[in-house]
Image: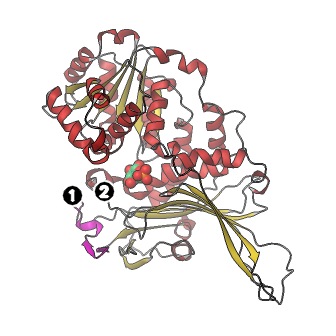
Amino acid sequence: MNDPKERQSENLPCSFVIFGATGDLASSKLLPALFHLEVATRLAENLTIVAFSRRDWTLDSWREHLRTMLADEAKDKLEGPVFEHFLARFRYQQGDLNDVESYRALAANLPTESACSRTVFYLAIKPADFTAVIQNLEAVKLNQPRGMSRVVIEKPFGEDLESAQVLNRLLHQYFDEEQVYRIDHFLGKETVQNLLVFRFANTLIEPLWNRNFIDHVQITVAESIGIEKRADYYDRAGALRDMLQNHLMQLMTVVAMEPPAALEADALRDEKVKVLRSIRPIAKRAIHAHAVRAQYAPGNIDGQAVVGYQQEENVEANSLTETFVAVKFYIDNWRWRGVPFYLRTGKRLAKQTSLIAIRFRHPPQQLFRETPLESIAPNWVLLSIQPEKSMRLEIHVKQPGLDMDTRVMQLNASFLKTDEQALDAYETLLLDVIEGDRSLFIRFDEVEWAWRVVDPILRCLVPRCAGVIYSQLSRDILWDRYCMEAPVRQRRCVERYNIVKRA
Ligand code: BG6
């Protein structure tokens, strides 16, 4: 998905600066992804990586940290020339995100040929620090030359529509849109990209992909982990901002979009924006019938007691931040009018699974009336994003025998052959940033339209909520066939659910 013009600078030296290099995102995703790319010989020789952090470390202590950090997943690869080569790419810059002098020191620490090279600035930091970094980069002219530097911003982009617009205006003061890479790592996941191929490379599928044949769509990202050590960020964000406004809505756009004219950044993004613009706004009075949020209570996982959300370290004791959210959307266009899209996500749910489930309509002809088959179940297509990367088709076949009885047969196909391994989403996306391919990154109008839809929900569900939210919808989406365990206790406006994990 590369625009050749955007890749002109590909052979120039590149510096990849990670702000927040000792933080959670860098440790769990970015650095392992860069190392895997090194092992796969996908990193250009002239790539330098600069770790920027406030810790008072030397380059040697940083390298030690890197070794310890990668030990878990790449132990067998930490000896030998590949790892040595990886270590040799690094520079370490101690600094304070709010202090312009740290950026002067950073500029001086970049490779000397960098005046004519590309520089990527990855903001793996709290959203509250974005502004300082953007302004300080400009102050020392690290945003120049404009064609050469890129800035990568993690989601959530803003915390509502207004703050997203403010952040975007700030960015555009100092960076052109071509320099801005708004990352949503779900778009880098193999199955999500495969969805485009599944839909648009198979004549079998596309004619059925509309309201005439599809009854509803469920998009679920269920996690069994809690908030880990991210209370600082999570308690302000909650599941709506952390997952639904970005990851789940992006999945919905890929399921619902029209075929783009080409696999190019803007053609793809134009189609995604059309979907977001067609989402029916949810009227204030209808919000409780369309959305539900909940928070996890104490429970146990595999026999081990685990604390509830409010007892997590650094979470306020009375916090009402949601750790589960589910919303029903309608997309009012020719293809989808009348088809509900159920989006739901939560932490500490019964199992770890990300799934797009498409339920087809009942067959129109009651051929089997007054036989045991009268209430024949509809077909499903299940696209599993993780842990399996697979497609399952459920169809009916006749059971062998004299009676007219059916059973559901599952055609289950993994997207990977046994000896294949999917790339991690970050591996794909980091390479795209380095190479200047913006297809899988978010344009601001996508962010803006997603906030327009989510903002009223945030405003209505979050503050001053004295009543209890418990709607028909919550029962539907929590209890249906692909359900997670349901809320068991209600507390003010937040439903709480117990942590249950099946063996
Ligand atoms: C992140 C969220 O964007 O995505 C996390 O901030 C969440 O809260 C994570 O756990 C899930 O991503 P993945 O790729 O691990 O499923």
Residue shown at 28%/57% (left/top)? 228
The relative height of residue 291 versus residue 14 in the rendered view (above or below) is below
Q: Position of residue 215 (x, y in %)?
A: 71, 66
Contact (CB < 8 A) between labels 2 and 1?
Answer: yes
The relative height of residue 318 versus residue 79 in the rendered view (above or below) is below
The relative height of residue 493 versus residue 52 in the rendered view (above or below) is below
Q: Position of residue 349 (x, y in %)?
A: 41, 68
Residue shown at 33%/33% (left/top)? 131
Q: Quadrant of the N terminus?
A: top right
Instruction: Kindly identify the amino acid type of the residue bearing the numbered disc 1.
Output: Asn
Q: Residues within 10 Å of mark 1 (few under 14, many from 20)?
A: few
Q: Position of residue 240 (x, y in %)?
A: 44, 56
Indicate the colouring scheme: secondary structure
Residue shown at 49%/15% (left/top)? 9
Residue 42 visible, this orientation: yes
Question: What is the span of residues highlighted in magenta in the rendered image?
Answer: 298-316
